[in-house]
Image: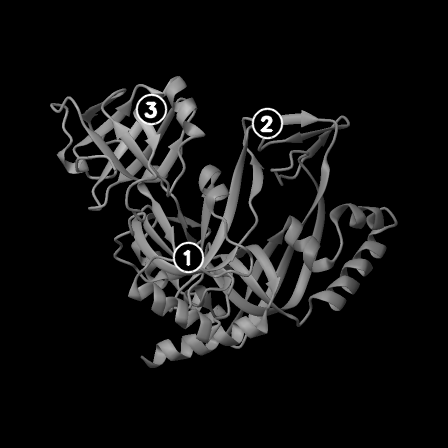
Amino acid sequence: MSVCCRIDLLTPYISKWKIYGVVTDKKRTLNSLSFSITDKGARQIRVVAFGNIAQLLDGFIDERQMYYITSEGSKVVPADRRYNTTGAPYEIRINSRQAVSLCSDMPTINPPQLAINATSLDRISSLGKGALVDVLAVVHMAEEASEISMKNGRKILKRNVHLIDKSNTPVHVTLWRDEASKFDVRPNDHPVIAIKNGLVDEYQGIYCLKFQGKTTKWHLNPDSKEAEELAEWFAMENPVFTSPKAKQRELLTIGMAESDQHYGTYINIVAQIQRADAILYKACANQKCRKKVSEINGQYHCEKCGVTCSTFKYDLFMNCDIFDATGCNTVTIFGKEVEKLLCTTAEQLALVQEEGYERYESEIQKRCTDSIYYRTFNFRICAKNCWGWDVSSVEPVNFKEYRTILKNTVRQLQL
């Protein structure tokens, strides 16, 4: 058994020293490797290596494993506050592979628990985009990791994880790269997760969490009373996971949504369609553009993209009157959402239109009657003003989820 010093006693002025501890927070970049090492007194320091040394250590260093680090081949330097989140004034820079060795003859040290001040998931939206928050929640579902192609052609790993807590509020976390691969949770497992310094993000009115580089830390099944109580709650209640697009705080009636305070925001409205006009048109060939093109000498010009080309694509938009018990309003639905409602594609409707306008109108009305009139949908809406709303998505209503939302809404109104 070796004689080791405490991590908090390390300074640049000590020439010979030896420490041991358990590794956490391993990070690998193109030219560097960093990790934290924690001793038996829960004292922590950051360790970093560069270039060839980082490459040599990468396959040797594993999280939750114990290692020795000595002064022979390493150096204690002031902490780089841009990347160091341990709170220690110094960090260790490894200059030789021989500075690090496996530790198997010392008492086992468990990885440190995250000290968090947990915020309920239903309060995340009130904190606003960009806020850092601590969370304690249950993993309701972890999606399979998938590769995403970036604009520069590189592919990176992505995984969506869906969380829920006692507030019955669903929130998803997006994991990238190493975090996505390290998050090894099977589909039927529901561990408790502690997240420290998660970054609040927002898209189209839906709030979620992101990991902010080295600032965000997470731990599965933390050893705490709060985590045990949360796991017991989930096992007993078996809560229904409601899609974030139907969160109760965003679910409004048409009458409520017509007030000024909701202009420019994204909301959900459960309503029925009583009138629909589907318009087929020639659009820019760019898949990300829906602008109508002008035909000039057999060429098709898009004012938005500023390009003229020989091809175009067919696209759709639909003006609808929707209603519920509190009122009626006009919405506009675009592209794929229209195709989903009509159970067909723009290209197929273009073939029908070639047979004549009356044939096209008859086909549209038949599909509206068969598929959408007086059926209940959940509309995700951007309320730009009181008289016209754009629909970003439309889905059939899951009445089991909807019933749960209504019950929770009534319960909150009674508080």
Circle 2 residue: 306
Is 51 located above or below residue 166 in the figure? above
SS class, disc 2: loop
Q: Is residue 302 left or right of residue 262?
A: right
* Tag 1 residue: 263
Position of residue 98 in the picture relative to residue 30 (left or right): left
For the N terminus, which image quadrant?
top left
Q: Which mark is residue 297?
A: none
Front label number (2 vs 3): 3
Foreground pick, 142 / 407: 142
- Decide: few, some or many residues near mark 1? Use Cα within 10 Å; few <14, some 14-19, many ≥20: some
Mark 3–mark 1 distance (CA, rounded to whole Å): 52 Å
Q: Residue at x 28, y 46 (%)?
A: 107
Q: Type of residue at label 1?
A: Tyr
Among the two numbered marks 3 and 1 on one chain, the one whose residue lies closer to the N terminus: 3
The amino acid type of the residue labelled 2 equals: Gly
Secondary element under disc 1, as helix, strand or loop, is loop
Separation (CA) of disc 2 from disc 3: 49 Å
Image coordinates for residue 214, horizontal then vertical, percent: 33, 38
Looking at marks 2 and 3 on the same chain, the residue that comes earlier in the sequence is marked by 3
Left or right of 89 on screen, residue 179: right
Q: Quadrant of residue 229?
A: bottom left
Foreground residue among 130 and 14: 14
